[in-house]
């Protein structure tokens, strides 16, 4: 199963996939890593010898133009699956429709709770006793696609946003790696 992974940030979830890929028998191969900016996480790909590309959002006049350029770069690699792993940008409809359902995203909350770009902060602000991590198929709305797998993560009274996020991320990483394995082994994303 060939993957293109798209990031915007530090790429700890990406790193988990790169490390999993180093294990014999991992049934997927990251063929390229892309970003919408000069993301720190691209260094992980370089360390593992995986090609990278950037399609800087700031270089384009509109989300659609950026999306078309991103889609073109992704298609060069002809991936079986595109993984959004901390891509902090909504994909235009035509990108989603071109790639879904072979387009998944990891989200640091127990969807449909706390969708959007501030899921961890929102869980803290809501005083939620627990949050979670979810892996979904990307659809047109914000984090509203079919849920592939999700798991609860407790919130401690002393938690601030980063403490909770650091507790969520290992769960995300484990769920993401397992989901890629499941898809490689035949999980039917069309049936979700
Ligand atoms: C992850 O929690 C992801 O779910 C969210 O942003 C975070 C990215 O972290 N969208 P990293 O860049 O993988 O470390």
Image (tube, helix red, strand yellow):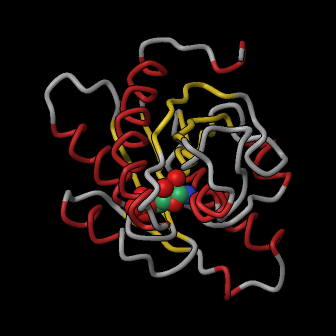
Relative to 137, is 183 above or below?
above
Between 145 and 82, which is closer to the camera in this rendering? 145
Pinpoint residue 190: horizontal percent, then vertical percent: 71, 18
Pinpoint residue 177: horizontal percent, then vertical percent: 36, 34
Between 40 and 65, which is closer to the camera in this rendering? 40
Place residue 97 in its image quadrant: top right
Q: Residue at x 53, y 40 (%)?
A: 132
Q: Residue at x 27, y 47 (%)?
A: 18
Answer yes or no: is residue 33 visible.
Answer: no
Relative to 79, is 60 above or below?
below
Between 82 and 118, which is closer to the camera in this rendering? 118
Pinpoint residue 52: horizontal percent, then vertical percent: 39, 65
Q: Residue at x 33, y 37 (%)?
A: 29
Could you tell whether 53 is left or right of 130 in the image? left
Count of number-bearing discs? 0
Answer yes or no: is residue 76 visible.
Answer: yes
Q: Residue at x 61, y 38 (%)?
A: 110
Pinpoint residue 84: horizontal percent, then vertical percent: 55, 51
- Quadrant for the N terminus, please: top left
């Amino acid at each position: 199963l060939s993957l293109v992974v798209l990031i915007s940030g530090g790429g700890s979830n990406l790193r988990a996939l790169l490390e999993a890929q180093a294990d014999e028998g991992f049934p997927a191969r990251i063929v390229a890593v892309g970003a919408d900016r000069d993301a720190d996480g691209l260094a992980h790909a370089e360390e593992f010898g995986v090609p990278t590309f950037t399609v800087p959002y700031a270089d384009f006049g509109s989300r659609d133009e950026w999306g078309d350029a991103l889609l073109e770069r992704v298609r060069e690699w002809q991936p079986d699956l595109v993984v959004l792993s901390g891509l902090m940008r909504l994909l235009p409809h035509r990108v989603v429709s071109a790639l879904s359902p072979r387009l998944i995203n990891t989200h640091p909350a127990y969807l449909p709770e706390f969708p959007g770009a501030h899921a961890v902060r929102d869980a803290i602000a809501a005083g939620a006793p627990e949050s979670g991590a979810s892996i979904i198929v990307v659809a047109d709305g914000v984090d509203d696609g079919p849920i592939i797998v999700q798991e609860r993560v407790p919130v401690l009274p002393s938690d601030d946003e980063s403490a909770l996020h650091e507790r969520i991320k290992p769960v995300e990483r484990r769920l993401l790696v397992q989901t890629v394995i499941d898809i490689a082994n035949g999980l039917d994303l069309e049936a979700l």
